[in-house]
Image (spheres, rainbow, N blue to C red):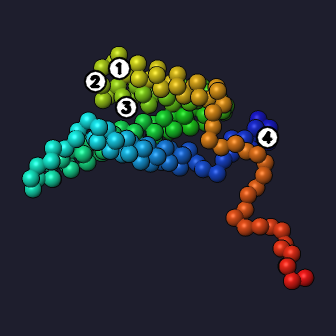
Amino acid sequence: MDTTERRYFEEEDSSLTKTMKGAATGLAAGTIWGTIVATWLDVPRVERNVALPGLLRTLRMMGNHGLTFAAIGGVYIGVEQLTQNYRMKRDFVNGAVGGFVAGAAILGFKGKSISTALSAGAALAATSAAIDVGGQTTRVDTGKEYYPYTTKKRVDAAN
């Protein structure tokens, strides 16, 4: 492996940091999604002087979705990083393996069946592979550096 390939693999975050970020992002996204689902499906009955049961049902649903998304995000990123470090390649296969393991392990466990595990794993693997092959990314390196301040000297209007 030459220096350009090694530099390609070196990033500012470690695998553990990326895994924790994936889990935290999943927790945030899942909690938001749980709030939306609770609003749509579990509209609390407005009862006189009894707001606590509805609030508890909503919080339980938010927590359930948040923890599920956090587990999926953490397992996905963790397995993707392990696969990348083991194979010493950075391609769509890493994401597909991570997606399959995350879908099969987490959603299969929640669904309590092998067919659910295989279906969820295949769906997440296919989605991850399609996104990676399609080149969809949230960051594009343009080669420019952006500073929160200007690096050029200002010309005063008085001169």
Q: Which residue is mark 1?
A: 116
Q: Is residue 9 left or right of residue 123?
A: right
Q: Secondary structure at mark 1?
A: helix
Q: Nearer the viewer, residue 92 or 30?
A: 30
Q: Amino acid at mark 3?
A: Ile
Query: Closer to the N terminus: mark 4 or mark 3?
Result: 4
Q: Which residue is mark 2?
A: 112
Whether residue 97 appears in this view of the structure is: no
Q: Amino acid at mark 2?
A: Lys
Q: Residues within 10 Å of mark 1 (few under 14, many from 20)?
A: some
Q: Which residue is mark 4?
A: 4
Query: Closer to the N terminus: mark 1 or mark 3?
Result: 3
Q: Amino acid at mark 1?
A: Thr
Task: Evaluate if marks 1 and 2 touch, with contact meaning CB atoms under 8 Å apart.
Answer: yes
Q: In the rendered image, which quarter is residue 40 located in?
A: top left
Q: Is residue 74 left or right of residue 49?
A: right
Q: Nearer the viewer, mark 1 or mark 4?
A: 1
Residue displayed at 15% across by 53% down: 51
Image quadrant containing the N terminus: top right
Q: Residue 62 placed where, x, y %? A: 30, 44
Q: Residue 129 placed where, x, y %? A: 57, 25
Given the current orientation, which residue lies at the most extreme bottom position?
158
In space, the residues marked 2 and 3 are separated at their CA atoms by: 10 Å
Task: Evaluate if marks 4 and 3 touch, with contact meaning CB atoms under 8 Å apart.
Answer: no
Residue displayed at 60% across by 50% down: 13
Which circle marks residue 106 in the picture? 3
